[in-house]
Amino acid sequence: MNEKRFRSHAQWPEGSVMQKKAKDHTMDCHATEAAAQAICRMLERDGLGGEGKIFPIKTWVEDLSAI
């Protein structure tokens, strides 16, 4: 079973990303905490869309089983 138990989050500079639910915030679900942490590290290293131009203000991982 491939349950998505963890969520990666990134907070972006104002006006960088427009999401319907949360302005300047992106998130994605992952099966493992390691996968979610890897996405956070990638965003911190490579920036939005991997372009190296816009970088997150902060990133974090949420454990969905704790909700």
Image (spheres, rainbow, N blue to C red):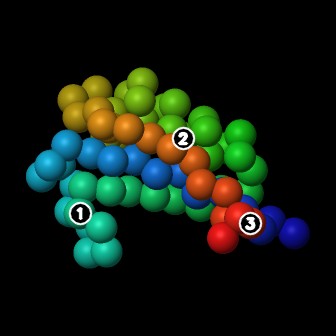
Secondary structure of the residue carrying numbered label 1: loop
Residue at the spot of label 3: 65
**Residue lying furthest left:** 15
Label for residue 39?
A: 2
Q: Which residue is located at x 60 percent, y 36 percent?
A: 38
- In the picture, measured across the screen, residue 31 lies left or right of residue 52, that is right
Expressed as whole percent of the image width and height from the top left, the position of residue 24 reads: 25, 55
Q: Are marks 1 and 2 in contact (CB under 8 Å)?
A: no
Q: Which residue is mark 1?
A: 23
List x then y, in percent, for residue 49.
33, 42
Number of numbered discs on residues: 3
Q: Count residues near mark 1 (Cα–Cα under 10 Å), then give few for <14, some for 14-19, many for 20+.
A: some
Query: Where is residue 20, by image quadrant?
Result: bottom left
SS for tag 2? Answer: helix
- How many residues crowd mark 3 within 10 Å: few (<14), some (14–19), many (20+)? few
Task: Check the image and report above or below for 39 versus 64.
Answer: above
- Residue 54's label in the rendered image is none
> Which amino acid, mark 1?
Lys
Q: From the viewer's perspective, is residue 16 above or below residue 50?
A: below
Q: Position of residue 7 (x, y in %)?
A: 58, 57
The residue depicted at 49 percent of the width and 32 percent of the height is 42
* Location of residue 50 with respect to 21 vertically, above or below: above
Name the side, left or right, on which 12 lies relative to 39: left
